[in-house]
Image (cartoon, rainbow, N blue to C red):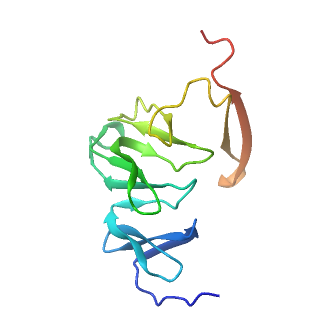
Amino acid sequence: MPSLSPPQFDSADVFSEGLARVELHGKCGYVDISGRVVIPFKFVHAEPFTDGLALVYTTWGANIFGTEGWDFFRRAGYINHDGKFVIDPRNTLNARGFSEGIAPFQPGISTAQNPKWGYLDKSGKTPDRSWPKFLVFWVKIGIMHGATRKVFRSFQFPPQNAS
């Protein structure tokens, strides 16, 4: 069993693909199992590695007019285990990590009234619309007194009757 490092970070996450996200003084980086910093603290937010890449935010941007307004200049990209950008940071409202070679991404300057999502492949491009054939996700359904359960949903993508 590896030796444990003494407490030294403001926040730490679980290990994923040999690295863990850690935070110090408001910046995120990654450490290896020995506690050695292998990707410096330079991101405003970072997610665990999945499918060989980690989602990182380089800026939080600005919001105008609150939840009904617009988000500007929030930038996210994806790094490899060496900390190098595989997908350069771009404007986004939201993004998620990779799974099965694609990542959900809400690009550009978005508004609460028009939140469009799409997918990126590992080259940073939008995959062919005919793939994946089925869009699968979990939906949380509220049950009595605020408890929730997850329900599996699957939809044909694109719909068969779409032109």
Residue 27 in the image, given as x and y percentages of width and height: 33, 68
Residue 70 percent across, percent down from the top left: 30, 37
Does residue 102 appear left or right of residue 39 in this picture? Answer: right
Q: Is residue 15 above or below residue 114?
A: below
33 up-or-down from 57: above or below: below
Q: Determine the residue positioned at 63% across, 21% down.
A: 158
Q: Position of residue 46 (x, y in %)?
A: 43, 60
Front in this rendered view, residue 82 or 56: 82
- In the figure, is residue 144 to the left or right of 118? right
Where residue 113 sits, quadrant-wise, is top left
Most extreme residue toward the top is 163
Query: Residue placed at 44% from the left, 39% from the top?
Result: 124
Examine the image and state in which quarter residue 9 appears.
Answer: bottom left
**Residue 1 position (above or below residue 73):** below
Query: Residue at (64%, 31%) from the top-left corner?
Result: 132
Image quadrant for the C terminus?
A: top right
- Is residue 157 toward the left or the right of residue 98 in the image? right
Q: Nearer the viewer, residue 151 or 107?
A: 107
Q: Is residue 41 above or below residue 55?
A: below
Q: Residue 143, how many percent across, how many down?
A: 71, 48
Task: Determine which quarter of the picture holds residue 1.
Answer: bottom right
Q: Residue at x 50, y 48 (%)?
A: 96
